[in-house]
Image: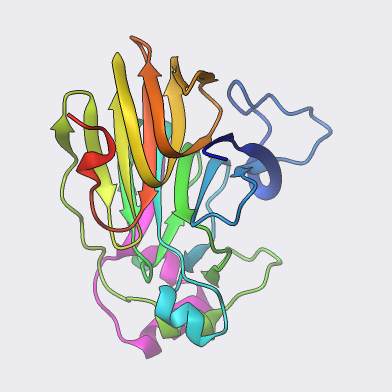
Amino acid sequence: MTVEKLRPKTVEKIWGRRDLPEPFGPIPPEAEPVGEIWFEGSTDDALLVKYLFTSEKLSVQVHPDDAAARRRGLSGGKEEAWWVIAAEPDARVGLGLREAIDPQRLRSAALDGSIEHMLDWRPVRPGEAIYSPAGTIHAIGAGLSIVEIQQNADVTYRLFDYGRDRELHVDEAVAVAKAAPWEEPPSPYALAPGREILAHGRAFVLERWIGPMSARLDAARPVWLVPLEGGGTISGNGFVAGEVWRAEGREELSLGEDAVVLAAYEGGRVRQELIPG
């Protein structure tokens, strides 16, 4: 399929929430809290889009890069980016460490829990994009609603989990972690009217498109579209906030006056030709 509306899958998490925003909630009081909503397609895609809703801190964790993952027999590694939809006043994310440490000290800090306090906890605000390369030690804090775009690999190594009864992966995490401060990427920048590059790394690029816009999408490789506000059409198919679409090929795109859409695609190169000028 050249244009496909992806199917949402609800994932319960102990750190999730019941008071999900529209169009996802609220969740009935007797139901388990929902932490993630995955959007899946009919193919084994390179990228995966999720919504995350947090009431507690997520584990202190790290993901391997492709090479490290394949050495362990996995299909690939995991880099990810976050777009902050909503944040409580004191909401934070931990990105990298406040100072570089050696593997032995990292192991000790994971085992005694002090790794939580070594993280560089940064305040975040709605409308902020963050790219987390593979190897970055990180944790998402409480009070956040986030769109997460990631390589489609379910590989997470937990260093610390606040005493929850879940498996840790200290040896694996220490082997792949960059136990150092996070290297802040370049700031977002405008590529063309209504088109902004939010974040990019080795694995994918994240853009924001703002309406009104009418263009012929020239997607030689797949593009994931995440409507945040307003609506639009892709090859005659209407889309609204809370959905995720995957498009490939030459498709007619139209964004309404109030539309805001995230667009993500694999590879570390900005695809300027995606929307011909």
Q: Is there any visible trace of residue 87 in the rendered image? A: no
Classify the position of the N terminus by image quarter. top right
In the image, what residue occupies the spot 42% across and 71% down?
Answer: 115
Residue furthest to the front? 250
In the image, what residue occupies the spot 36% across and 41% down?
Answer: 219
- Relative to 184, residue 251 above or below: above
In the image, what residue occupies the spot 54% across and 70% down?
Answer: 158
- Relative to 23, residue 6 above or below: below
Q: What stretch is highlighted in magenta?
A: 90-117
Residue 104: say if magenta: yes
Residue furthest to the top? 257
Residue 275: quadrant of the picture = top left
Residue 181, image x, y percentages: 25, 67
Total count of labels: 0
Between 165 and 42, the one lying in front of the other is: 42
In the image, what residue occupies the spot 45% across and 57% down?
Answer: 139
- Relative to 30, residue 116 above or below: below
Q: In this view, does 107 lie to the left or right of 274?
A: right
Between 20 and 110, the one lying in front of the other is: 20
Q: Which colour scheme is used?
A: rainbow
Between 120 and 199, the one lying in front of the other is: 199
Residue 184, image x, y percentages: 20, 56
Q: Is there any visible trace of residue 222 in the rendered image? A: yes
Residue 139: say if magenta: no
Residue 246, image x, y percentages: 50, 39
Residue 253, image x, y percentages: 38, 23
